[in-house]
Image (cartoon, rainbow, N blue to C red):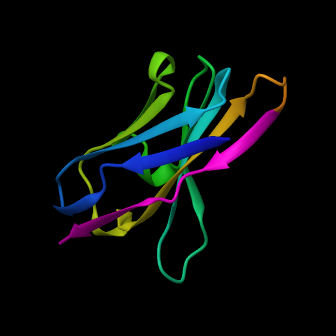
Amino acid sequence: QVHVVESGGGLVQAGGSLRLSCVASGSIFSINAMGWYRQAPAKQRELVAHIVGGGSPIYEDSVKGRFTISRDNAKNAGYLQMNNLKPEDSAGYCCNAEINQYDTSRRNYWGQGTQVTVSS
């Protein structure tokens, strides 16, 4: 069993910063990939940032230059540093972890999400 928990959301003024954390625990051999998604009311969920292994991260166009995804493999954790936040960044943010398990399987796990609200 694997659990993924996000934290770090909150209310911030436009131009401010937040750092989201995602920590996976349980039967984990390693984490192959980690991604951050967001969904605003009445909108589809979208990929914000994604990183596979030690490769180059990818970002949704509107967050390039403002958001940075990173990982700490030793802690089975990932982070999303969000700078220069805009009201349109307001959404529920979820972490997805693609986990290699001890039984050689690879599965995706989602956290419950954390809310980010940016006031103008």
Give the quarter of the figure containing the N terminus.
Answer: top right
Q: Quick check: 16 left or right of 101?
A: left
- Give the quadrant of residue 57: top right
Q: Quick check: 10 left or right of 54?
A: left
Give the quarter of the figure containing the C terminus.
Answer: bottom left
Count of picture labels: 0
Q: Quick check: 98 left or right of 93?
A: right
In the displayed structure, 30 sits above or below 17; it is above
Residue drawn where x is 17% and y is 52% of the image:
16
Foreground residue, 118 or 94?
Answer: 94
Q: x%, y% of residue 56? A: 57, 23
Q: x%, y% of residue 85? A: 26, 55
Is 110 inside the magenta-drawn segment?
Answer: yes
Q: x%, y% of residue 91? A: 41, 67
Residue placed farthest to the bottom in the image? Answer: 42
Q: x%, y% of residue 115? A: 36, 64
Residue drawn where x is 48% and y is 16% of the image:
74
Q: Quick check: 60 left or right of 9?
A: right
In the displayed structure, 11 sits above or below 34; it is below
Q: Main secondary structure of the magenta part?
A: strand
Residue drawn where x is 65% and y is 21% of the image:
30
In the displayed structure, 56 sits above or below 6; it is above
Foreground residue, 35 or 27?
Answer: 27
Residue drawn where x is 54% and y is 52% of the image:
111
Is 29 inside the magenta-drawn segment?
Answer: no
**What range is drawn magenta here?**
106-120
